[in-house]
Image (cartoon, rainbow, N blue to C red):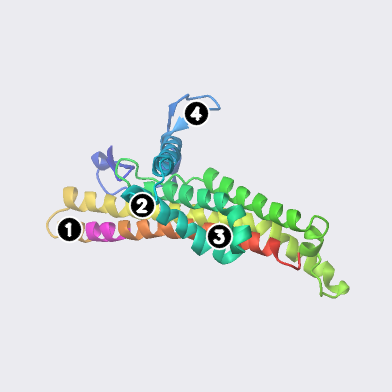
Amino acid sequence: MQLVNGAFIAADEGGFHGPSLDEFFPEGIFFVGTPFEMNRIMLIRILMTVLVVVVFWLGTRNLRLVPSRGQSIIEMGLDFVRVNIAEEMLGKKDGKRFLPLLTTMFFLIFAFNITGIIPFLNIGGSSVIGFPLVMAVVAYIAFIYAGVKKNPAGFFRNALFPPGVPVWLYPIVTPIEFLSTFVIRPITLTLRLLMNMVVGHLLLVLLFAATHFFILEGAGLMKGLGVGTLLFALVFTLFEMMVAVLQAYVFTVLTTVYIQLALADEH
């Protein structure tokens, strides 16, 4: 067995062996057989969580009027979330109130996504459903909290029985509103993040595994195909880097949109 971009390829058995979903369920490394069992993906999540905390702690512990290079990068990242997401969609007051949540969500999702292209890690911490589900639950709680805080008596009533809709339509509209607002939102948030990371990882492994097979086992002109798959793999690695940022942005924006809808006057 040989490790290629995080996937074990059975090259010694001959033939090409592509990636499988088993890669997202690696064997335990620590505390095997206990409820606290930790595998490679869990270790990646812990590593990136610690890294995010350390980076922001080091970048903000000694703030200067004239920022250093590191402080400038941190401030650019924070300003991106503050200006382009929080304040742009929620206004200054509510944007400031939800900024810590949105900032944490954006950078943590990005950190977990980007590990899919980091050598020796080679799999996204968000490519197993646990993390996307937790983020979706956090977003779900945030927009319900925002709505109840803004309108304790009328949030759920207005969400399920929209003002202006004829009463005789409520038997049709209310189930649709319930499903779309309180069921489909967290499901789509979870699946959008999860599936992008799963598909991206499988494609990268497929391309690198094909490169490995064509160059090392292919005969004659088949070795040239390995050059092509390698080029595709490198291009797709850059694409995955863009997807890592884009998915963090989209998830955070959708969370902000849901909060914005919960804070709307009609609620």
Q: Amino acid at mark 4?
A: Glu
Q: Is residue 49 left or right of residue 72?
A: right
Q: Nearer the viewer, mark 3 or mark 1?
A: 3
Which disc, if any, is residue 222?
Answer: 1
Tell me the CA gap for discs 4 and 1.
43 Å
Q: Amino acid at mark 1?
A: Met
Tell me the CA gap for discs 4 and 2.
46 Å
Residue 41 or 249: which is nearer the viewer? 249
User: In the rendered structure, which disc, 4 or 2, sits on the residue that comes first in sequence?
Assistant: 4
Q: Amino acid at mark 2?
A: Val
Q: Is residue 229 above or below residue 135?
A: below
Q: Which residue is mark 2?
A: 66
Q: Nearer the viewer, mark 4 or mark 2?
A: 2
Query: Helix or strand or loop: what does disc 2 sit on?
Result: loop
Q: Position of residue 226 (x, y in %)?
A: 20, 56
Residue 30 or 161: which is nearer the viewer? 161
* Crowd around label 3: few <14 · some 14–19 · many ≥20 (10 Å): many
Regarding residue 176, the answer to whether it shows in the image is yes
Q: Is residue 214 above or below residue 125?
A: below
Query: Helix or strand or loop: what does disc 1 sit on?
Result: helix
Q: Which residue is mark 3?
A: 86
The answer to whether the residue labelled 4 contacts the one labelled 2, judged by CB atoms less than 8 Å apart, is no
* Crowd around label 1: few <14 · some 14–19 · many ≥20 (10 Å): some
Which disc, if any, is residue 41?
Answer: none
Q: Which residue is mark 4?
A: 37
Query: Helix or strand or loop: what does disc 3 sit on?
Result: helix
Q: Amino acid at mark 3?
A: Ala
Q: Main secondary structure of the magenta part?
A: helix
Residue 181 or 222: which is nearer the viewer? 181
* Crowd around label 2: few <14 · some 14–19 · many ≥20 (10 Å): few
Tell me the CA gap for discs 1 and 2.
57 Å
